Image (cartoon, rainbow, N blue to C red):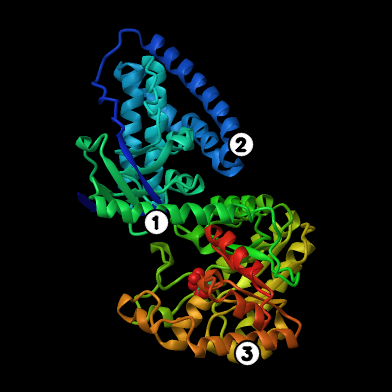
Amino acid sequence: MITISGQSIHKRLAIGKILFMQADRPELCRATAEDADAELAAYRDAKAEVIGQLHELYKKAVDKVGELLAHTFEIHAMMIEDEAYSGMVESMIRNEHVTAAYAVAATGRHYAQMLAQMEDPFFQARSADIREISDRLTDQLLGNHRESAISEPVILMAEELGPGETMQLDASLILGLVTHRGSENSHAAILARTMNLPAITGVAIREEWNGCTAVIDGEHGLLIVDPDAETLAVYEDKLRTERAKDEELAALLPLPSETKSGVRVPLLCNVSCAADAALAAELGADGIGLFRSEFLCLGGSEYPTEEEQLAAYRNIVATMQGRPVTIRTFDLGADKRAEYMHLPEERNPDLGFRAIRISLAEEEPFRAQLRAILRASAFGTVRVLYPMISAEWEIRRVDEMFREERERLLQAGVALGEVERGIMIETPAAAIVCDRLAGYVDFFSIGTNDLTQYVLAADRQNYAVAPYYDPHHEAVTRLIAHVVREAREKDVSVCVCGELAADVTATAELLRMGVDSLSVAPNSLLAVKKAVRECE
Ligand code: PEP
Ligand code: MG
């Protein structure tokens, strides 16, 4: 029995035989060609053919994984058409007199390496996309057909899987995925989660394991090859429990989220990207309760522009088809920072320059975000949510800017919808004086993750103080109850969006207090619906 630790991509269990997928594309040697024009024509034909195939794959994938994720194929088609990529291939053929297949392989390697060396995990993850389109093109040029060797359910083990390859997998034959290269942020990882496949990456895979029985313990990021009888029995038992739970939860999909006495409890989702929102929509979420918009800031070399943000917000608004989308303004700082922000090094980052404090100090990026949110409201139901408010003057100032930007857009004749305004209740100060803050907003969203760490003075990221970080501590519970009471008094709706909302042992108590809605990660939605339906 061998146990290896990797990085969990999707926290589920799998038991089965390993199929080791050969990286069956030997590196192409540099080969010269006599007739550059013929190679150029071959490249252009292959390009047209592959783009056609990608459009076909897109159409099929829409049914399988939904519009947003299927979009990967359209992005691949665009990447092939990209001038930098195609320009490099054509220039190598013309100037270096190499074969089209070699030019494609060399161009693919060049861009894939460049992206893999970037610090940002988002760009590193795009390296797999470049490799995949280059492989498709070389296969087309060389007449290779990468046949799938999968005929029975297996745990697929591969050096790396591209997003297209992942999407083409027949999920009924894949028990789980184990890869060496990959990252939590890659399209392939997002797809694995969407397809609900147990998956881990970062495992030094070995061909000799082909055919061995193995366990993927996604919860703990473990691969166990050749488990002994006792271990196998333990995991078989866990798998039976997981399946029974899945079946029970899947049956809840068409049922409403309501208590036994018929009180509707809207269940919203916390999302960080468009793919999460697609999953939320598929699971029947009543809306997006928290879009952590700051993730848009972490990939680039500067703040996303107003137009880029508008496109991202519209995308999610379109996905939710009229259901409310709550966009939290950038909650940057602490562990969410990028070079270009020039944030100070701080001794206590969680108590430092973060969230609304940055927005109040750097008005222009904040105003651009407010405009993008306002403009997105013309396309659906949009709400704005401000993080880490702790005093009345902060919300007053923020609201002033919101009104100014709204007025400016209206003056310019831009179409806008009504945008409800809310604040995160995640500092003890906000919770205590929430009656005063209520006058400025339409809703509260209780962020129990931060609220717990600030109330109990226990860093939410410090494992050493984990026993002190207890969202069920009476001090936290009493504060939540106080906020809900005040909110009801002031006619402000109240949602809980911290992790406590997904803790089914807390559901009954939150509802008893009078919380109006809960916002949870998409994968927790059905479990929470079950808990709601069990409440009186
Ligand atoms: C929270 O603090 O509870 C919350 C939902 O926000 P985040 O986890 O993004 O800090
Ligand atoms: Mg928070």
Pick the quarter of the image with the C terminus: bottom right
Q: Quadrant of residue 36?
A: top left
Residue under numbered circle 2: 63
User: Which secondary structure lies at badge 3?
Assistant: helix
Instruction: Sort mark 2 into few (<14), some (14-19) or many (20+) by Cα contacts within 10 Å.
Output: few
- The nearer-to-camera label among 2 and 1 is 1
Residue type at the position of mark 2: Asp
Placement of 401 over or under 286, stated as above or below? below
**Whether residue 358 is visible:** no
Residue at mark 2 to residue at mark 3: CA–CA distance:
46 Å
Residue type at the position of mark 3: His
Q: Which mark is residue 273?
A: none
Q: Quadrant of residue 56?
A: top right
Q: Ligand 1 within 8 A of label 3's CB?
A: no
Residue under numbered circle 3: 482
Residue type at the position of mark 1: Lys
Placement of 203 over or under 264, stated as above or below? above
User: Which secondary structure lies at badge 2?
Assistant: helix
Specify which label sits upstream in the sequence, 3 or 1. Answer: 1
**Percent position of residue 202, x then y:** 29, 49
**Percent position of residue 152, x then y:** 40, 31
Instruction: Sort mark 3 into few (<14), some (14-19) or many (20+) by Cα contacts within 10 Å.
Output: some
**Whether residue 252 is visible:** yes
Residue under numbered circle 1: 238
Disc 3 + disc 1, Cβ < 8 Å:
no
Q: Quadrant of residue 42?
A: top left
* Of 365 and 256, the residue lying toward us: 256
